[in-house]
Amino acid sequence: MRGNIKVLIIDDSALARKLLSDILSSEPGIEVVGVAPDAFIATRKIKQLKPDVLTLDIEMPKMNGLTFLEKLMRAHPMPVIMVSSLTSKGAEATIKALSLGAIDFITKPTTNLSTTMEEMRQDLVTKVKIAASVHLARPRTTIMNVAPKLSMDAVIERASFDHDKARSETVVAIGASTGGTVAIDHILRHLPPDFPPVVIVQHMPPLFTESFAKRANANSALEIREAKDFDRLMRGHALVAPGGKHMLVYMDAQGLYVNVKDGPPVNRHKPSVDVLFRSVANSLGPNAIGIILTGMGDDGARGIKEMRGAGAFTIAQDEESCVVFGMPRVAINMGGVKKILPLDDIAPFIINMSKERQETNGL
């Protein structure tokens, strides 16, 4: 039987080190084996203590967290959870950290400490357990058994696709969580500039989704940005659901657009993949492609099943290429997935599929 998960906390703030240490030490199955105030002390302690997971502050003296992370991932890859401030600067640095190989991130508590501290505790413990189960060279299956708070019924009702609204344009809907920023960026950077509209839900808080969209935009031939209410879906464009809001796709006389709205968390997430996928099933039916990527939990599994039931083509990222095979595995087990593909094969596949649909429809 495996022993406790050994965690090393790296943060220049004594208060932050104590806070993180107290949270993790109180959780059965997790052992804080040490703390370090900077990257140089951390390097020595990694060799001495051999932790399973690191928590790493972005802003540190002598060597910042990003520089340390980059060196670490080259010399000794291991699971890292970033600790970020809830600011634009913190969001930009966190997105870069994820691209460098960090597994996930948590944000430091700000106001309303009684609420945010409990949320932070649950978030930190869950992500440390997930990170400890991930082998960076070959990801393993893992699902956290966290009971959902609400289903997508709380935000959008299910409806049968109206075939009188049938249209030839294809829309690609993508949903992801842990490991998703890198996976989504990988797909988007391989799509041509005239590709059909793409709508994306990546589990992230406000500010972080905007930074993610900007970074993805710099790497892609598509125009990628955070969605605003009533944005139109257009070829060559990708819209990312803003953190803290749900994104839904609707149709009117002028075509397709997104509704960005508040509402309760669905499957503990806002934005929720299930909400986006149900809206796509309702509005587009067979004229859509649904893709569920790496992530923990089951958000998106029910929605992608509804997409498939409405005639959409549905794809799941395979276990080998996932950081966390939770969301795709649940979707596959529920019967919502038509094809399972490695991450490298998804972009070529949907490019070919969109071309075939264009030719079939005489576009």
Image (cartoon, rainbow, N blue to C red):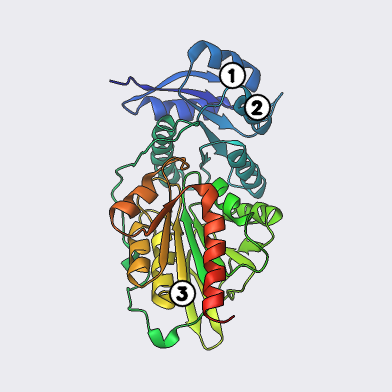
Residue under pointer 1: 42
Q: Quadrant of the C terminus?
A: bottom right
- The dot on residue 311 is none
Q: Name the residue: 72% across, 23% down.
A: 62
Residue on which disc 3 sits: 287
Q: Is residue 235 left or right of residue 134?
A: right
Specify the quadrant that holds the N terminus.
top left
Q: Which residue is mark 2?
A: 68
Check whether the beta carbons of the residues at disc 3 and disc 2 lie within 8 A of each other. no
Amino acid at the residue labelled 2: Phe
Q: Position of residue 132 (x, y in %)?
A: 42, 29
- Looking at this view, is 92 or 349 the one in front? 349
Label 2 and label 1: CA atoms lie apart by: 9 Å
Q: Is residue 317 visible?
A: yes
Near-viewer residue (227 or 350): 350
Q: Which element is circle 1 on?
A: helix
Q: Is residue 244 left or right of residue 238?
A: left
Q: Name the residue: 33% across, 25% down.
A: 29
Q: Label 3's element?
A: loop
Of callouts 3 and 2, which one flags the residue occurring earlier in the amino acid sequence?
2
Residue 174 locus on image (x, y percent):
49, 59
The amino acid beneath tag 1 is Ala
Query: Which of the two discs, 2 and 1, labels the residue nearer the N terminus?
Result: 1
Quadrant in the rendering for residue 66: top right
3 or 2: mark nearer the eye: 3
- For residue 63, above or below residue 192: above
Within 10 Å of the Cα at label 3, are there few (<14), some (14-19), or many (20+) other Cα atoms? many
Q: Is residue 238 above or below residue 21?
A: below
